[in-house]
Amino acid sequence: MNTYLFRKVTPLVALLGLGLTACQPDIEDDFRADKGSADFSRYIAVGNSLTAGFSDGGLYLEGQQNSYPSILAQQFSLAGGGEFNQPLFTEAQSNGSGYLRLTGFTAAGTPTTANVTTNLAVRSATPLLYTRYDGRVDNLGVPGIRLSDIQTPGYGSTQGNPYFERITSTSTPTQSYFQRVKAEAATATFFSNWLGNNDVLGYATAGGAANIITNVDTFRLKNNRIINVLTASGAKGVVATIPDVTNVPFFTTVGPTFRATLAAASVPGIVVQTGSAFGGPTSTNRKQVATTDIRDASGSGRQLFTLLSSPFLGLLNQRTGRAWRYVYAQSGQPAAGFSLFLTAYGIDTTATFGTSAGNPIPSLFVLDDVEQGLVRTATTSFNSSIVAKANEKGLAVFDANAFFSRVATSGIVTNGVNNTAAFIAGNLFSLDGVHPTPRGYAVVANEMIRAINAKYSAKVPTVNANDYRGVRFPQ
Amino acid sequence: MNLKSLLLAGGALLSGSAAWAGGYQVTLAGIKNNGMGGVGVGLSLDQAAMFYNPGALAMVKERGVQIGANLTLARNAFVAEGGNQQRQLRNTVTTPFSLYAGFGPSEGKFRAGIAVYTPFGSKLQYADGWEGRTSLTDIDLKSIFVQPTVSYAITDQLSVGAGLVVLAYGAVNLQRDVPLPDSYGHIELDGKAETKMGFNAGIFFKPSDKLSVGINYRSKIDAQVKDGDVTFSGIPASFSSRFQATRFSATLPLVATTSIGIGIMPNEKLTIGLDANLAQWSKYRVLRFDFDQQINGSTSSESKRFYQDALTFRLGGQYKLTEGLTVRAGGVYDETPVKDGYVTPETPDNDRLSGTLGASYAFGKFSVDLSGQFVSIKKRTETQADLLNNGTTDRIAGTYKTNIVIPGIGLNYAF
């Protein structure tokens, strides 16, 4: 009886085991990575701070490791991509240039930040220089570079851009960015190019008070040149357009709160300074702004206040020159020149701040409607140059402008998690209000992958953006 | 029909048919029925008629006690939209069971009985760190129903029956990860359902030795959890003020089912059953949780389900090979109640095809039933575009595929 049962039951158990093994479904084959008509064996990334992985107002190791080119290269490696080298800071100098960290919130809910000043990679304070990186570099992102700078000889010298200097060979100190890209492009099979943001961003973040917008023709010429050199040896690639910078938290965070404060105190309007031209209280650089003309969260009103204005707007109506001392300090001029500076702009620091023409809110803190118009016009024409050239060369285009406009309007959900363009709470923008967080860079990388896949019939997998952090909170 | 041809028929059905019904409904109430694709509404096989059609109970010849237990072994694969990494469940086993005891005078027209069974349940544990972690990491849904039943044969051909269905035990445990800016916390909802009642009624008509028909209706019961426990873990101090809730309440509809069944007995050895069920899943519109205190600024959460009514078709048969041995086979086609763009990780559902096999061996008054079912839930893809269109971005876009193997064993004692 026992052996009878055993003989009957054993095959059943075996069958059950077989059934279970066969039971596990396998759908992985449906999602195999594929390079399509692209070749990712050597990928190089050309661009500025966004390409370098700049975040929280600085370039540091974690940001570099989470740069979109680094994420792209990691995903390309699933579809035949090769080694990808970034000019990483060392662990010992992992804080690189230094950056902003969140320290907490005031009782009113305003975030407070501090500079990280330890473990920096600064090898000289004047001129500011960072620890050199002499190995092979595939991520050529240089924070601060404008398209108009790419053919400037000596841009990578000790008198030039310190981020370019640290990767420029000491044997060719005057090599321009263009020449460097040309040398690297000779062996590249795939590239990304996202240059041009700084040609308009610098002007915008300075509230129109400094940094001119690059001439449209110059922009087109330089863009054509760099794309020509990148595609000269047959490489395929992806290019990105320039987002409308007025959608980033740097411009959208402070205004709504300020407007609400003014409305609550029944202040009908304020006085701001605009542009950078000299002139006193009766000159055209003074501008009356009605409280209702400050842009709020719903988009009503036009005038934008920058993140840098945040510590000073609470001084409204006080007789103080604190904001002006800050603005003057930013110029890097000797302290002795401060009174001349005040005279040139007709500033009376004993007048009430922000409510009198004698002591307006500095131009540096306000991107007004006229300045926004210039920014928008430039962005539009820059983008048409970028898209036209990309189409001519058959390149994939990531329309960052359209994408970030959508994010500003309706946010983006990543695998069930909501992300928006809001400061800190939105997950996508870092503490400088302009550069993405690792989450933001992952989202950018995914969008680029979609553009690449569509253009080259490739199947490069995207990443789970939620595996990348938003803003780091104090522990 | 010999054994070989029956097994071949069964093999053919395997690529086709049935065990769990759509959503979180489990139709595993009788081991004999399990082997025949879950048919039973138009049959009077055994005490499990209390579940399938109380009207048929009075036509069951023997009185007896039977217990049955199943192992459901669900295996799932998931790939997120745009990704290429397959996620698999941390494998678990659930054990739907049943117990029936039927009494009554041997020649009388009355039969009474008590049934205990588990018609709704689900247990899934997703891979650590999977892409949908903020929708769900773990679900464990259990229910035990107790059903005192009476059945009365009005004539030799017609009988009716009804049972009081008591949701005697219901438990829900739901867990998911909470997205924070730079980390994840975890929330666990754990609660017991209130005792609720419904009914199960049926009519059974057997115009000849070769034909029987049945109709059955099981009412809806709303499983209601009040004062369930909310437990947070891994929430850093800087966010803890945003996660205050300690209690939750929620309602899950255990939906009404209407079934019709036909039994065909061409000879004394062969029985063929054919069932169709309609489950009124359209009652399941939203899954809402109410909390005693706020979670991230809100004291409730609502997630769209928008299920639709779904039909299930079952076909099965048994053949009495020898006096002791009976073999069975069957198949099921089970429509999903979940519409495109509404799939959630709790029920990664789609239309199902199942194949079943079974056998019984009788030793006098004792008999043993075995059943085996293979359920193939069709591959299902939902895109982020679907989710955006439906306003259901609280779940995840990707492709799911699930198979379930369910061996079962039953013991009967007739008196």
Image (spheres, coloured by chain):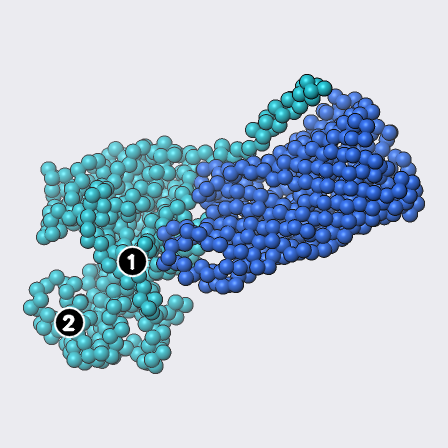
Chain colours: A cyan, B blue
Q: Considering the image in quadrants, where does the C terminus of chain A appear?
A: bottom left
Tag 2 or tag 1, which sits nearer the N-term? 1
Closest to the observer: A26 or B252? B252
The local secondary structure at tag 2 comes to: loop
Task: Please report, as a chain letter, where disc 1 is located.
Answer: A
| Residue contact at pointers 1 and 2, CB within 8 angstroms | no
- Which quadrant of the structure image shows residue A78? top left
Residue A233 lies left or right of residue B312; in this view the side is left
In the rendered structure, which amino acid carries the disc numbered 2?
A: Phe
- Image quadrant in which you'd find residue B276: top right
Residue A71 visible? The answer is yes
In this view, which residue lies farthest toward the left? A336
Amino acid under label 1? Leu
Q: Which mark is residue B26?
A: none
Identify residue for label 1. A102
**Spot occupied by residue B317 in the image (x, y as percentages of width and height):** 77, 32
Locate residue B290 relative to residue A132 in the image: left or right. right
Question: Which of these two is toward me, B298 or B337?
Answer: B298
Q: Which chain does the numbered disc 2 sit on?
A: A
- Please state the total of marks drawn on the protein image: 2
Looking at the picture, does residue A110 appear above or below residue B132?
below
Where does the image place residue A378, in percent across and percent down from the top left? 28, 59
In front of the other: label 1 or label 2? Answer: 1
Q: Is residue A158 above or below residue A207?
A: above
Residue highlighted by disc 2: A278
**Residue B119 location (% of width, % of height):** 68, 45
